[in-house]
């Protein structure tokens, strides 16, 4: 079993839809949770960052962490064609070393006009 | 200019050849990383370096070596390339946040696509 599981997709939605992207994990020591966005032929870039449990909102994006269920989510409201990309969750904790991230495999999102 | 620059961007080589992928950064970060990305497997850490004198193996270091020539330069070598090293390779950097902990933000280059025939 992988330490971090993420559905590869693709997830296809129409413009304006609410998108939900999710990851589950098995390591209860994870404390830092991140979402990276990767456009085609580009390197990943950090989108959202949360520490421990709870929600964090940034514009159209909301990140949720439920440590009791070992489940994290990224919600995108009013999705746009420019949101079409691969979204990777990443996490770290004391036993992995805070400086070393464990990544999910990524979910490919396609937003059609 | 990109903050993290990788060369070459694309390379096709044959089994048994020695390959070097180079990474340079202008962000002034001490920490540098090499990852490979494969479909269905995601990003996996090959090597990382927290400063010029510090080199550490990641989860998949077998078959690879690295050199940290300077704070800004970190090279990845495949001494004898094999087909299952065909992948997209990323260099990344990070810095320390307040309190000395990493913010978790990695800054990636645009990747080097390597094909080993």
Image (cartoon, coloured by chain):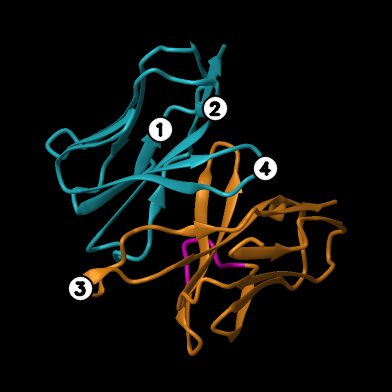
Chain colours: A cyan, B orange
Image depth: mark 2 or mark 3 in front? 2
Depth check: B17 or A83 in front? A83
The residue to which callout 2 is attached is A82
Q: What mark, if any, has residue B99 been given in the picture? A: 3
The disc at residue A41 is 4
Q: Mark 4 falls within which chain?
A: A
Disc 3 versus disc 1: nearer the observer? 3
Residue designated by label 1: A6
User: Could you tell me how far apart the alpha carbons at marks 2 and 3 are, in whole angstroms?
Assistant: 36 Å
* Disc sitting over residue B40 in the figure: none
User: Is there one chain holding both mark 4 and mark 1?
Assistant: yes
Who comes first in sequence, dot 2 or dot 4? 4
Choose top left, top right, bottom left or bottom right for residue B78.
bottom right
Name the residue located 52 percent from the left edge and 47 percent from the top edge.
A44
Q: CA distance from mark 4 to mark 1?
A: 21 Å
| Image location of residue A39, percent across then percent down | 58, 38
* Residue B9: x %, y % from top left: 76, 56
- Residue drawn at (34%, 28%) of the image: A60
Tell me, yes or no, whether the highlighted magenta stretch contains residue B65. no
Q: Residues within 10 Å of mark 2 (few under 14, many from 20)?
A: few
Dot 3 falls on which chain? B
The 10 Å Cα crowd at callout 3, few under 14, some 14 to 19, many 20 or more, is few
Magenta residues? B57-62
Q: Is residue B63 left or right of residue A47?
A: right
């Amino acid at each position: 079993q992988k330490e971090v599981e993420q559905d590869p997709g693709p997830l296809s939605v129409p413009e304006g839809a609410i998108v939900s992207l999710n990851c589950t994990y098995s390591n209860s020591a994870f404390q830092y949770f991140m979402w990276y966005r990767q456009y085609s032929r580009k390197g990943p870039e950090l989108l959202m960052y949360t520490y421990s449990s709870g929600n964090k909102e940034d514009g159209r994006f909301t990140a949720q962490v439920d440590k009791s269920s070992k489940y994290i989510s990224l919600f995108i409201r009013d999705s746009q064609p420019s949101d079409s990309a691969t979204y990777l969750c990443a996490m770290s904790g004391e036993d992995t070393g805070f400086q070393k991230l464990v990544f999910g495999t990524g979910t490919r999102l396609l937003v059609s006009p | 200019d990109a903050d993290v620059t990788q060369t070459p961007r694309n390379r096709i080589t044959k089994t048994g050849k020695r390959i070097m992928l180079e990474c340079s950064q202008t962000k002034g970060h001490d920490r540098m990383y090499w990852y490979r990305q494969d479909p269905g497997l995601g990003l996996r850490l090959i090597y990382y370096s927290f400063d010029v004198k510090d080199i550490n193996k990641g989860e998949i270091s077998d078959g690879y070596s690295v050199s940290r020539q300077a704070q800004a330069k970190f090279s990845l070598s495949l001494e004898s390339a094999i087909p299952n090293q065909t992948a997209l390779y990323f260099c990344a950097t990070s810095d320390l946040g307040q309190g000395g902990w990493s913010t978790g933000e990695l800054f990636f280059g645009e990747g080097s696509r390597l094909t080993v025939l």
